[in-house]
Image (cartoon, coloured by chain):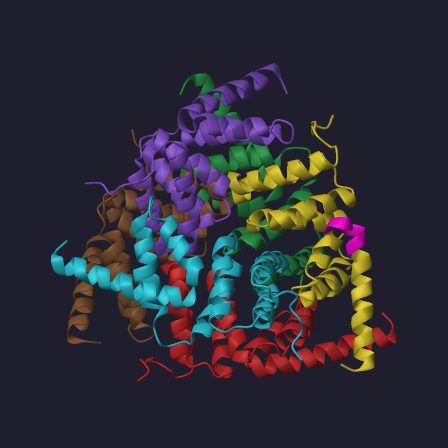
Chain colours: A purple, B cyan, C brown, D red, E green, F yellow
Amino acid sequence: MSANEAEVRRERFEHGMEVLERIDGEAGRRVVESLGDVSPELGHQIVAWGFGEVYSRPGLAPRERQLVTLGMLTALGGCEPQLEVHVNAALNVGLTPQEIVEALLHSAAYCGFPKALNATFVAKKVFGERGLLPVTAEQ
Amino acid sequence: MSANEAEVRRERFEHGMEVLERIDGEAGRRVVESLGDVSPELGHQIVAWGFGEVYSRPGLAPRERQLVTLGMLTALGGCEPQLEVHVNAALNVGLTPQEIVEALLHSAAYCGFPKALNATFVAKKVFGERGLLPVTAEQ
Amino acid sequence: MSANEAEVRRERFEHGMEVLERIDGEAGRRVVESLGDVSPELGHQIVAWGFGEVYSRPGLAPRERQLVTLGMLTALGGCEPQLEVHVNAALNVGLTPQEIVEALLHSAAYCGFPKALNATFVAKKVFGERGLLPVTAEQ
Amino acid sequence: MSANEAEVRRERFEHGMEVLERIDGEAGRRVVESLGDVSPELGHQIVAWGFGEVYSRPGLAPRERQLVTLGMLTALGGCEPQLEVHVNAALNVGLTPQEIVEALLHSAAYCGFPKALNATFVAKKVFGERGLLPVTAEQ
Amino acid sequence: MSANEAEVRRERFEHGMEVLERIDGEAGRRVVESLGDVSPELGHQIVAWGFGEVYSRPGLAPRERQLVTLGMLTALGGCEPQLEVHVNAALNVGLTPQEIVEALLHSAAYCGFPKALNATFVAKKVFGERGLLPVTAEQ
Amino acid sequence: MSANEAEVRRERFEHGMEVLERIDGEAGRRVVESLGDVSPELGHQIVAWGFGEVYSRPGLAPRERQLVTLGMLTALGGCEPQLEVHVNAALNVGLTPQEIVEALLHSAAYCGFPKALNATFVAKKVFGERGLLPVTAEQ
């Protein structure tokens, strides 16, 4: 790798890390750190590409990206750890617990009740940790 | 919501709850209760629609609905909590441990061994809790 | 079914049909009609429950529900016919082609390129039918 | 391969082929034949193992195996060609169109509407080819 | 975007395009081109990141990357268009039809017969187009 | 079952068990043993068919089969227990931690980051148990 390539690589990572910290906060940084001894390159790519190149694009508002993301993670199934990060991220970018819960109720019609339940219990865990329970209907 | 709509809504829930209790028993009621502080509407819809409108239809016998359900939950993957409820439900409506295990063996040909294994270990957990181990071949 | 139950059932269907027509338009109605000779009950439930009870809820704006839906359908895979209906619906409720394409690019990071590609080619088909190609970057 | 192993292999195939023909009929045999020039071993294993060792086991009735199978194929998604074979098989072993349609309606609560729709339209195609449309509610 | 960023972006694309052409050949280029009027950015990222940053890494031989890829695409389901590209790519990097077919037979044990069948019929289509049928057992 | 059939069945199991022990080692044997009181037939078929008939075929080297398998298990999602067995198996047949990690990084482009992360954390667990952390870039 040339000096210039190494510099570009470092800049891309730093830019992505700023985006990641703004959206995912502490939870996202912990994921990247825990990759350090097993696959630092996966951590690099999540940051530099996933956040630096994709998430940071202007075409959708952060809360809209999180709605797409909640839909995808619910539908994929088996991605509870990532849902936990992204329910936190959804709150960080301004979605309310009511809106998150509504998105997951909506998912029941498309993914079925089991996946909607799995995702809702992840949301319950995150809301509990952040003192946001009970979620009450909006007036 | 008009008084009449509220009444219809309540009746639909009560009807669904009777169906749920007959099939899923305690395990199903606990799922609905645990939704109470995060998404009571999801709990309502599972009961009023899932059980009250879909499960209660006459076109298939309860044990037949459970066979379809075991097949779906095994194939979806990542739905171990729901499989646990439905292995219990399958026993409640008269499927034997041998039949449940046979359905999951059958699933190996369609979903592969990993998902068949995940589902079978859920069944083992439920059978153990209900004193139904070991499962012996039917004579 | 009592006269009152039949009336409630009819009203729920009609309410759902209004929601469906507003969101999915002609494409949604055609799906329901094509179920008429094979599973009219599935058509009824999609309309009365899916649209009448879930989609019509106030907690998320229609464009936000479509973003969740596009994410789910992309992640599920194999749901190209439904994606086609919902790319149309997304346009109907005000998402721009640029926003739809951005949501699908976003999906690449979570679902991988193959599913993102499948969804993007469905969007291309719909955009082409509606004279919305080429999609140009927003200024 | 010893002469005895070849003999065992041939017998296992023949036994499986009898089961396949009884259940899947012509459609199943065509799948195996179309594998002849690309992966005859996959065809052999589907017949000798899938049908000869799994499907032929006594623990579940054929119609019950088909209900599990319809549930799995609906949930997996993207398995429309196999669903077509197995909707035919379901009819062959005595499930009525009403029961098949009911199982697929049931699947909507667990897999969501998109997968239930995909499966139902496969059923419609098969029913149409066998002169079984319209499917009318059982009295 | 600064002049330097645009230059880096262009170089990354060109590097990725070289990798893509070496592996996927004409089929890969056609996919990227067909994105031109709907999501050129998705095409850019597949090339610049997918091929330029991931595929081009030295840690696995090209034929090994294709084996992983065939396994993933078979397991995901509904990715037949991408499987078609990657069966071609697998042949391009030196896997034989026998090895590809063997990998797909192997997949039956992990993903079940339906997905193994779908993938095998894609392979048959590609082999047919390239005059590689019938696939005969290796001696 | 005739005496001859029982003998064939026993031989097939013994042959598969040799293959399983060579590849999966202790972890694989434990899975089969834990099926003993719930579904010994599933254990038998995994051994006799999965390992004895599929895995033992000569068309792909063991390390190549493991690469296909890692790709499939990552893509399926929710198969962390099986991934754990197969990361161990991959090491047993000669894949290095670097190659395994590279295959999982590769999977990010096809399955998305969440599934790549889930698989990589399983690999981290296995590597830790075997004293193989940190994984350092190959020189």
Q: Is residue F8 left or right of residue D61?
A: right
Q: Is residue B55 above or below residue A11?
A: below
Name which quarter of the figure residue A87 lies in. Answer: top left
Nearer to the camera, F118 or B129: B129
Q: Nearer the viewer, residue F26 or D13?
A: F26
x and y percent of residue E106 in the render? 68, 58
Where is residue B10? Give x, y as percent: 23, 60
Q: Given the current orientation, which residue lies at the most extreme front position?
A: B131
Magenta range is F20-27
Position of the C terminus of chain A, as image quadrant, is top left
Q: C33 or B46: which is nearer to us? A: B46
- Is residue F24 found inside the magenta-colored segment of the image? yes
Up-down: is B65 above or below D114? below
Name the quadrant of the N terminus of chain A: top right
Magenta span includes F19:
no
Answer with left or right where residue B139 lies relative to residue C25. Answer: right
Q: Note whether residue E134 is visible.
A: no
Q: Residue at x 81, y 70 (%)?
A: F10
Q: Residue at x 44, y 70 (%)?
A: B65
Image coordinates for residue D115, horizontal then vertical, percent: 41, 61
For this view, does B105 lie left or right of residue C70?
Answer: right
Which residue is drawn at the image coordinates 60% and 66% (left, top)? Answer: B132
Residue D103 seen from this side: yes
x, y percent for residue D92 = 50, 83
Q: In this view, does F118 lie to the left or right of D136?
A: right
Relative to F116, residue F66 above or below: below
Observer-nearest of B18 and B77: B18
Q: How many labels does the image show?
A: 0
Dominant secondary structure, magenta: helix
